[in-house]
Amino acid sequence: MLPGSREKVPRILILATEACAYPGADHVGQIHAEYPTNAYIVRVPAPVIFPESFYLRCFEKGIAGILVMSCGHECPYPGAYDALAARIGRVHQRMIERKLDTSRLRLCAICTVCSKAFLKEVQQMHEKLLQVDAEPQHAP
Amino acid sequence: MIGQSSASANSGEKKQAPRIGVYICRCGGNISDVVDIERVVQAASQIADVAVARQAPAMCSQAGQDLVTEDLRNQTVDRVVIAACTPSLHEHTFREAIARAGRNRYLYEHVNIREQASWCSKSDPQGATEKAIRLVAAGVAKARFAEPLSPIAVNARRHVTVVGGGISGLRAACDLARAGLPVAILEKSPFLGGRLVQWDRVYPTEQAASDLLRELLNEVAEQPGITVYTRAEIVEARGCVGDFQLTVKRQPRGVDDTLSPEELGAAIDACLVRVPSEHDFGLSQRKAIYRPCRDSYPNAAAIDWEHCTRCGDCLKAAGGKGICLDDSPELISILTGAIVLATGYDLYQPKPGEFGFIDYPQVITLAQLERLLDPDGPTGGSLARGGRPIQNVCLIHCVGSRQIEGLHEPGLDGKIHEYCSRVCCTATLRAAAEVRRGLPATNVFELYQDIRTYGRNHEQYYEDAMRAGVIFLCYAADQPPLVLKNPASGGAPLSVVVKDRLTFGEELEIPADLVVLATGMVPRNLDPIIDRLKLSRSAEGFLQEVHPKLRPVELAVSGVFVAGTSQAPMDLAESCSSGSAAAVKAAALLSRGHIELDPFRARVDRDRCRGEGKCVEACEHQKAITFVETASHGETSRCAQVNSALCNGCGICVAACPHQAIDIAGWQLAQFDAIVDALVADYS
Amino acid sequence: MMNSVATEVDALVIGGGIAGLQAAIDLANQGFEVLIVEKEPSIGGKMIGLSKVFPTLDCCSCICTPRMAEAEHHPRISIITYTDVRRVDRENGSLLATLIRKPRYVDADRCTGCRLCEYACNMLVPHEFEGGLGARKAIYVPFANAVPQLAVLDLDSCMLCGNCQRACPTGAIDFLQEPRELVVRAATVIIATGYEMIPAGFKTEFGGGELKNVLTALQVERLLAPHGPYGRVLRPSDGKEPESIAFVQCAGSRDRSAGVPYCSRVCCMYAIKQAMLLSGALPLADLTIYYMDIRAFGKGFEQFYQNAKAMGIEFVKAKVARITEDQDQNPVLRVEIVEEDGRVEERTHDMAVLSLGLLPAWNPAEAGLAAPAADGFVCSIQPHLAPSRTPDEGVFVAGAAAGPKDIPDSVVEAGAAAMEATAYLRGHGRSGKSADPDDSIEDEQDTLATGDVSA
């Protein structure tokens, strides 16, 4: 715990594509719009790189929610978006097996100036997590 | 290979613990007004392997950059984490600074604490500070795994193959040669020039098409680096960008250039075969030994092997020389670095009965009209059909274009052509003006939906036509004109019935001596080449570019470019621009003799790979991964291998591998795991 | 004014819009040294201000910013913004361009784009980038994704209060800057100066630009941009959500009397696109496009048009003769319906959009280059075979500088102009640095595997 840190808030991991969602997140900052500070953005060329186990490991480690922000069908890598969408579906299956609420993992498309959509996704995830479970499943 | 991303190289740097330098930017106050910089620096200095943690008012300033280069030069640190604004602004700046200090530019991690921390958390400085600390820790965690990388160089042959000897192919070939690249032109027919030679004059300059072709051929002839193969088709294609291996089947012309014009004339006269002339769109006939027109290039004739009876009459007439009736093709191998596809278009062929086509000889296509208008054409420039002087000409726009599913019947190709063919409106107006130039008393009717004279100096044709008394009748897509036999005897042979939107939707009947169908452009059947090069097609069947705005002349297969009307309908100028644009892309690609790729590509850990092939399956789009057999100690084993020239670094293979045997350089899965560990850890 | 020492480049590209950027990148990728000179404070041209683009409806920023970044970071491209080209002279076979760098009143070497000056400034002025609908400060970074990220001070709006100077952490504000003359020697020049829209006030019959709810197409682009001036679609007079919007096609195009005789080529498609986007933003709004001919000629355009019709956007073949407004500032259009009976009607809408045509943005003759063609755009001497060749040897043209053009056609033409410039450079003994095969590995070709086979 950081010294002086307040009550524990659920941590959101945002996997944001280098081409679209990451600059989209920058745009939110550029217009000085605010969203909860517990949302951590990680830059990724294409989230299709992550195997199913990666997501499950994240939850085990204490990440409460994951937003995969892709470029959608404008993805610069042929076939990657469809493969990603299929994979997220499989992770949802495995989450059900593990009794994890599937709303903790969400795939969405965010473009370079989609600031409204970005804020909506983060806010919704934040509220959902507070609602579903204030504490992560396996808090460290 | 010149360079290679190396996972195991430079182990010297790995032996000792990394010494990471962390630099936090205040950005004037943009960051420090919200984020408590002191606390971030303090927290960063506590993280394992962090040698120094410093701050600066502006890291991007010279003073800020000097902090980093100084620490690198005196070996205080061996890798760098900079927390500042978004990487899109200054990642490049800092990579350059690190390179200036003599270190590898990839031993660096950029952390975004402005756009993604201070600016989006103004009302929560404490939260922003904690976020910044975790983001810095995540950056350090990723940097710990960072390894020196260098661009990958792939060998590239300085040679381009242009498929198609029409106007865009010739333009591309000529430009590539001017850029210093050797070029092979593969033309399917025996003659260069494509469809341009079939037009009489072209809008908007009214220049003769044959003059323009000659001008371009002269430009081509000035270039020594161009090899032309007529009657040549690709039958096999292997390899990838920078190194394609093409097998080309080439049929002989049957006629060489040793015959004098008289001997050739005698040979052609002697031939008894009659074939409808493609050049004249069937309005005339040609022999099996032929030249399409006076201006054909090359000037030598050719034998149409499909229709030639091998009777030998031509050979006899030519004095027993200069002609060889053996049509055995030869196979040529061409090694080339890039391919430009300039395979052109076909014209929409109306079905029998469509607007009276075939049923009435007075119904012709716009292309046929162009041949009739050509003084060198089959009628010497006369429009007369069956002796009657032409009084009324009806031109019907959008035949085979702008079709609507459910409203129009599929054409002979079984398809509905929804698109606009772009060139027909102006071409039709131009032809109408030409008709009136020759026969000023002719009444011209244009039956159209929208007049699309969009191009530079095109609108003038529309204005001129209106001023000259051309009658415009606007029909709705669902009420196309009808072409009927004129029941009144002695008058015009045909009658065109149209409901005109411009005059209260009134139904008008126009007696017509000639009906011209402005047919559009349709895609050619390119199945063989599409299959061989694994290309994709648009819904209409034209070649599909990667992106209409970012990469309009590139196809999905790296190193293959598109020029001209094989991509979409376009006019002469647009085809030439497209040919030049394709040429400049190929020239840039091959300018250095090797192609430099950024190092973020997949690589296989041979010790872990068990040859199961999940990655090969996953990489279905790029097809960058194959198997290699390796023999060691008498046993052969199978292992995946990545072709960096094809790999785009998407990482689809990484997730597929059950043994963690494949990774993307610079974006290792282990780095992401370390980032997550750092984000969930506590910092006290 | 002071003369600076001449810099020397292979190619000078005039204009940093999409065509100029693409031409510069295509040349630099062959090893040529390129300088882009841009008259505005940021590169990106008109394209960076657009919302979404036809016919794919992809986000314009997403496809424009990568090109801006590529040019900015390219080792062989230099960019000089806020600079005009005064003259282009010929000297010993090369071209000598005299540039006038306008004062930014901000030291580019010191400014970090932090915007503290912008926050400190108290002056609000209509923002050009937002078509005048939003406001900016007197000192400002031109827009969110501007390249370079440097502030610029608009001295005409400045009160000289000194707030910005006090706020600037790097001491970059310099009220004493003056225009600087720079001389650049280039072997070849590419004109990519683009277009300007016909001014909204061009036609008194359309209200002369005074009617509040009659917008220009570029203003509507900003209304529709995700980060536009209002953040949503509102009509300017009273902030009401418009329920009925009219598009007036050929506003200034194909009109010899008030505007230009030529077709501006992009207006049909941008109007259809805007109507589609508006129907997404305002699902209940009635959208009417008054047109003479719909010119949906490009790849995928006709299908786009048909989709718009299927969505319920109304296309009326009609001439708009006059626009006035009623007491509620609703635009009233006097329309001659061409279809049916040719009747003349007055139709009231909540908002009207003028689909304004395109004018040339620069006259090369003013810089001593060849005079433009009759349409005012740069003259092409071989309009069929090499449309980018101009009457001036070694000077080529790309994009809308050679006539109205959409983005795909501009990008293709930029490539063609770069190709012509390449040939010209090579013909004059220049080959790009490391562009020649001196570092090629051709000799080893047969012994090398294709690609980097890593294991």
Image (cartoon, grey):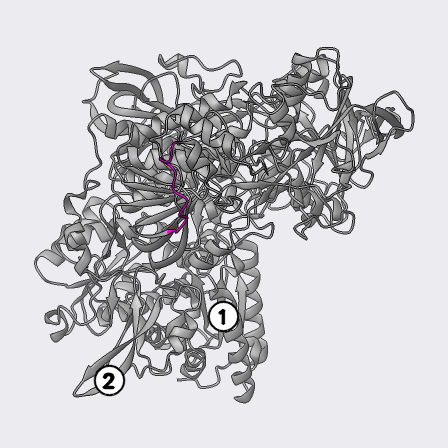
Secondary structure category for the residue under label 2: strand
CA–CA distance in space, label 2 to label 1: 33 Å
> Subunit of mark 1?
A
Position of the C terminus of chain C, as image quadrant, is bottom left
- Image quarter of residue B356: top right
Is C402 located above or below residue C367 in the figure?
A: below
Dominant secondary structure, magenta? loop
Q: Residue at x 44, y 51 (%)?
A: B555
Q: Nearer the viewer, residue B296 or B499?
A: B296
Q: Residue at x 67, y 18 (%)?
A: B435
Residue holding disc 2:
B636
Q: In the drawing, does residue C443 fall left or right of residue C345?
A: left
Residue holding disc 1:
A83
Tell me residue C351's x, y (percent): 73, 34
Tell me residue B119's x, y (percent): 43, 54
Kind of residue sitting beneath label 1: Ala
Kind of residue sitting beneath label 2: Thr
- Is there any visible trace of residue A32 in the rendered image? yes
Please say whether residue B321 is one of the residues in the magenta stretch. yes
Q: In the drawing, does residue B672 fall left or right of residue B633?
A: right
Q: Residue furthest right?
A: B488
Position of the N terminus of chain C, as image quadrant, is top left
Q: Nearer the viewer, residue B51 or C96?
A: C96
Mark 2 vs mark 1, foreground winner is 2
- Image quarter of residue A130: bottom right
Boundaries of the magenta span: B319-329
Please say whether residue A110 is one of the residues in the magenta stretch. no
Tell me residue B216's x, y (percent): 40, 27
Q: Nearer the viewer, residue C438 or B52?
A: C438
> Subunit of mark 2?
B
